[in-house]
Amino acid sequence: MSEQNGSDTLSTQLLKRAAPGRTDFEDLVILPVLAVVVALVLGGLIMLATGVSPSAIGRSFVALFRGSLGSLTAISETLTAAAPLTLAGLGIALGFRAGLFNIGAEGQVIMGGIAAVVIGFSFEGMPIWIHLPLALIVGALAGALWASIAGWLRAATGAHEVITTIMLNLIAMRLVDYLLRHPFIQKEGRADPISKNVLPSAELPHLLDWVDPALRLHAGFILVLLAVVFVWWLLFRTTTGFEFRAAGLNPDAARYAGMRSGLIIVLVMALAGALAGLAGANQVLGVLGRASPNFSGGVGFDAIAVALLGRSHPLGVLLAGLLFGALQAGGRQMQVSAGVSLDLIAIIQALIIIFIAAPILMRAVFSFALQKTAR
Amino acid sequence: MDIELRGITKRFGDIVANSNVNLHIRAGEVLGLLGENGAGKSTMMNVLSGLYRPDEGEILIDGKPVHFRGPGDAIRAGIGMVHQHFMLVPVFTVAENVVLGVEPTGVLDHLDLVKAREQVRQINEQYGLQVNPDDLIENLPVGIQQRVEIIKVLFRSAEVIIFDEPTAVLTPQEVTEFFKIVRALRDAGKALVFITHKLHEIHEVADRISVLRAGKIVGEGLPGQTSDQELAEMMVGRPVVFEVEKKPFEPREVLLDVRGLTVLRDDDSVAVDNASVSIRSGEIVGIAGVQGNGQTELVEALTGLRRPSSGTVTFQGKDITQASARERHRMGFAHVPEDRQRAGMVSDFTIAENMALNTYYAPPYSRGILMDWPKIYEDSARNVVAFDVRTQSIFTPAGTLSGGNQQKMIVARELSRDTKLLIASQPTRGLDVGSIEYIHKRIVAAREEGDGVLIVSSELDEVLALSDRILVMFKGRIVAEFGAGARKPSKNEIGLAMAGAVA
């Protein structure tokens, strides 16, 4: 009897989670924040080196802040820019979790966008509650199918997804050029490659119209928040997510546990593609209203950085997406009011990723402030 | 050369790996260092070989204190280490491997392999090592590769040689040969340290014994005089039962019947050649054999991880040759894989997640596609207690557990459900005495509950202790069977069969 009680107390104790240690906090919060700060400082130094005066540098950082968070317009712009980055970033994070390095978000964004546009300009007179969801779903499906090609190739033939997704990106880019000149898609009376306009019934409604019709924030952002919750739920609450994570961390152990790796790979790629496709649909239905060459604007590539910065955790991806969205929105302001090129933002984003990817470097630089030091 | 470690303390953060360790290593003597995994043996030897710097204490060579700034200093001082995992380039010859890093060179930095071969030959003759300097490493058996490692340290003029678990990878015959070499080195005046957790080996080869537990030297002994019981108690810190207690052998119906099974490796070479095995309820069948003779592939075929090219596997009268791993799991197969970290667990998963690794797909651990985490946590906590996995919390990543606790976690996962057949490969490889004792007890308990058990092990002692029936595998074939009859087969008989010497 007493032994029974003893083992019961013991098992109760085992159910206690250790409070996140100081080093966890460093890994998840302090290091990314430091990376951003260091990247901004280095960005300033680069400006200095390229002959920008210190006062202009000061003004550009003020503009960066104002343009991203300084007003309702700025916040609206930040969220608008963050939406596709977060959606595609979630897809890439899902791949990372399952051990797949999906470079193909860009192609998947393009395919999703073009498919959503086609649905968007067709079906005149369809009510919005059918038309808009249909356009979104078809966009997601197009991305999913496009990504599944790489997934299937990996599962069936072992072709590495890094190679196949890069190639599929190139094909998607050229394919969209062709499609935009196709009479069915090309806008009537235009010689340049540009699609017909999305009908109002397929547009993502603006959320802040009641404040100011110029605010671009649209319902796509609600979709983003839903997607964050969905990916979190999928990864940590479902058997499918359990399989994804096991296969990603130790494919051999997953196989020994009876999981079917081929199926997992195809499924993960399809879901990642669906999220990227949704990002493309989000752009054409919420912001652009039509598709043109390069309408994706490299979202699929920036999303890789977002997934890395977000440590492949849905919440982290959301925060990273918001940061990158803020940099983009603020960067435009910086260009306008301080005359600093938007390319600087690309450099800062790249620096952030380099510092995130080199935690040992960061720990060495900040060894005075961090507990866990570089070995 | 004499080496003395005096009051060595080494800490990693809050963890004290070595605490005030005193050790004396003398020329012409074999010091046996005994200790469980995680007792601090490796830390101590890494201090001695210059990889770690001690926080306190000093190292004296022939009475004079020395300070090693790195492994290079230790090598120059004459300390050599033979690691458990060999560090050889497979496509190089013996001579090339030996001189790697300290190559004799001639005019214009020309690599002088003639001289290298000559030097290797000299060392060879001096200690009777019988290694051909021109052989490629990849063509050599493990036992010879180990001798190449020994030549490497001798070539660097080592006077002190540390062997880290040197017999773990050897066949019984190779172990005998290895001990001869150790004695030859000792007689030549070298100082030797022999790290192990196997008691019988330490009696056979050591001149003195030191026992390390939880970073401290807890006792000393003399081979032949200090009993196994005493040594094991020092090592584990409590009395240890050696004999595996088994109820009398009462086999019932045949559970698994394998007929004419042939399995190919990935490169299409034959791994298992026309093997037939049957396992009955309440029976432990042991498969002995040197690693790489097809045991891995046999187990993979039996557990549904590899398709056999011919033959049949029948389980409870049903043909399951084509059944998947998951289907067999549902039928009551339990599998403890040979490489626990690669195949048995996900290091970055928590203990609880690992406990559900292959049972997650059905009730009670999931409903539909939804995981039932509270149920998983509850059962994990219970099994952690029941199977003596030492941990603070079930939310600890499994990779941070010691090898013994990782294995207990896997055994807990496999045996805590209703099983009919247990297939365990190398179930206690690399584990300490306490964990081995525990896992053996669990395996026997499974037999007593009426499970059929298949044990695959390269530890002959283990196969002998557990099995009701022993099969020996050599080059993919089952070359000998030692029944459960009155007479227990001798180690030598089985050892010979393992080496392929069967009439």
Image (tube, coloured by chain):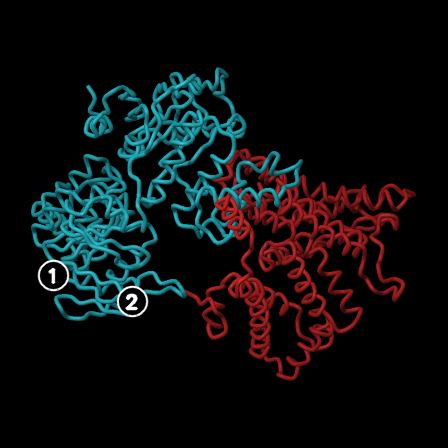
Using the numbered discs, state the Cα–Cα distance from disc 2 to disc 1 in whole angstroms.
21 Å
At which x and y percent is residue B130?
12, 40
Instruction: Note whether residue A37 is visible.
Output: yes
Please identify the quadrant where the C terminus of chain B is shown. top left
**Label 2–label 1 contact, CB within 8 A:** no
Q: Which residue is mark 1?
A: B1
Please identify the quadrant where the N terminus of chain B is shown. bottom left
Rendered hue of chain B is: cyan
**Mark 1 burial class by Cα count in 10 Å: few <14, some 14-19, many 20+:** some
Question: Callout 1, which amino acid?
Answer: Met
Name the residue at 44% across, 27% down: B449
**Chain of the residue that carries numbered disc 1 in the rendered image:** B
Rendered hue of chain A is: red
Element carrying mark 2: loop
Q: Earlier in the sequence, mark 2 or mark 1?
A: 1
**Chain of the residue that carries numbered disc 2 in the rendered image:** B
Query: Can you name the residue that lies furthest to the right here?
Result: A125
Relative to B487, residue B416 above or below: below
